Amino acid sequence: MGLFSKSFTPDTDLPDLKGKVVIVTGGNSGVGCAAIQHLARKGAKVYMGARNEEKAKAAIEKIQKAGLAPGNGEVVWLPLDYSDPRDAKKAAEAFLEKEQRLDILVNSAALLLTPFKLSADGIQEITVVNYVSPFVFVRTLLPLLKRTAQEPNTDVRILTSEGHRMPPKDCHFRSKDDFNREFKGETLASNKRYNVTKYMGVLHVKELQRRLEAEGVPIIVTAVHPGIVNTDGVQNFAHSAGTLKAPVYAFIANAFFTSPEKGAYSTVFAAAAPAIREDAKFKGGYVVPPGKLGSVYAPTEDPELGKELWETTEKILSDIGV
């Protein structure tokens, strides 16, 4: 079972999710798609947040062919494009018109290592997809999540898929320039840009949890590291690495990385396992395989840095009219 312990198996260790409504972004492939299958098999109605209709419907058909018994849940496509925070907001608003509750929100959508590029709003593209748009999506859905959490016998959770690494030194978020660090001319610049976005994600998780607790809202927020998973994104990166490197990268991914089905174990553990609700340490925590608390880099625990990121994000969004 590789990185994953036999102590947690979704089929036997997740509760009945009939009547629960779930959103999983980036759900048409990889860990997100596998998580949808695990949760739907427990009876949940799961919205697959994905940009491409053809790919989403193909993924839903694949999930249905694999079978949703014994829970016989439902999988529904939710058009969602994280390349523009306005589209993220529209997708959330479209969901709000369809459903009266939201029990679990899983953010799995992300860009991997990409060239430096600014969006039309002058924000780095990978930062928009990996952090800014998810921030907007969660913010728009938060009132419904809060209302659901006040109902009897609910267990509302928000989680973000994160594999964060040590950010560069003196990492602050005081302005748009801090969101757009290019690391031009530095070694592994694309890795560093990616790492900063995942670092921002963990800071957001912890700051959101602090704010919910201050309001007395019983929602659990977690960051989740699925492990080193052989996703479509990893395969695409491997095959784009150049003629000489591509076969090597693809061999490493196929031989040593975990399958998406098992990579989703940590995600569904954080999304629905009773152990999360039973242990207060999971609030604002970082879940790692095989479903246990991991350690984060100390600066992510800094409430002032989390507040700084939150307030700068809100200002940037206000400036662009979102």
Image (spheres, grey):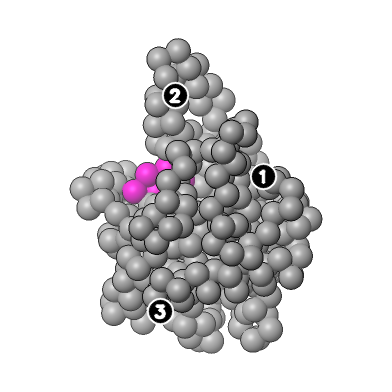
Q: Is residue 41 left or right of residue 147?
A: left
N-terminal label among 3 and 1: 3
* Disc ID at residue 241: 2
* Residue receiving disc 3: 101
Closer to us: mark 3 or mark 1?
Answer: 1
Q: What secondary structure is marked by label 2?
A: loop
Amino acid at the residue labelled 2: Ala
* Outermost residue toward the top in this view: 244
Q: Which residue shows up at 39% across the image and 65% down it?
A: 85
Q: Which residue is mark 1?
A: 165
- In the rendered view, would you say 38 is above or below 151? above
First of labels 3, 2 by sequence position: 3
Secondary structure at badge 3 equals loop
Q: Which residues are magenta?
A: 28-34
Q: Main secondary structure of the magenta part?
A: helix
Residue closest to the eye, 127 or 293: 127
Within 10 Å of disc 2 (Cα), the crowding (few <14, some 14-19, many 20+) is some
